Image (spheres, grey):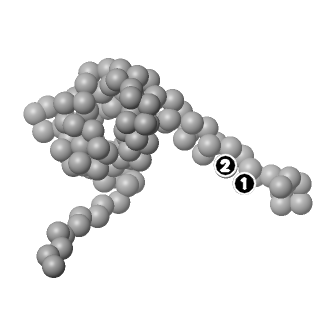
Amino acid sequence: MSQNPTEFFSLDASTTVTLYELAECCGLSAAELDELVDYNALVPLTSAPERAFSAQWVVPLRKAAKMRVDFDLDVFTVAILLGQLIQIELLERQVQSLQALVPANVRQA
């Protein structure tokens, strides 16, 4: 039995991925990702011809791609959805930061 080598990479802001790596990770085509860039929903770190993206896009794009399939969404709707998913993630981080400031004896379950 032959196994394909699997590549792993970190998903932090310092890691970059190419357009084709991002397409492979997220289940969207390179053309669909280009369309998201055209809608300004996806921002590359470098411009064409070889676009590179922060690896932080992988998780929200995977969620958006899954929702696209589940709800039969077009790419424009995915662009709107992607913006909302990122906003939700930012708000969740803010809530966690604020909760960390509350003393343990004051926190509610």
Q: Which residue is drawn at 72% across and 46% down?
A: 98
- From this view, report whether residue 18 is shown above or below residue 70: below
The crowding category of the residue bearing disc 2, from other C-alpha atoms within 10 Å (few below 14, some 14 to 19, many at least 20), is few
The residue singled out by tag 1 in the image is: 100
Q: Which mark is residue 108?
A: none
In the rendered image, the residue lying farthest to the right is 105
Q: Residue at x 23, y 48 (%)?
A: 24
| Horizontal and vertical percent position of residue 3 | 18, 73
The residue singled out by tag 2 in the image is: 97
Secondary structure under the numbered disc 2 in the rendered image: helix
| Horizontal and vertical percent position of residue 43 | 32, 32
Query: Is residue 93 toward the left or the right of residue 64 in the image?
Result: right
Q: Which amino acid does label 2 sit on?
A: Ser
Q: Are marks 2 and 1 in contact (CB under 8 Å)?
A: yes
Q: What residue type is labelled 1?
A: Ala
- From this view, report whether residue 1 is shown above or below residue 94: below
- From this view, report whether residue 64 is shown above or below residue 55: above
Q: Which residue is drawn at 57% across and 36% down?
A: 88
| Horizontal and vertical percent position of residue 99 | 74, 50
Question: Could you say which is closer to the camera, residue 79 or residue 100?
Answer: 79
Secondary structure under the numbered disc 1 in the rendered image: helix
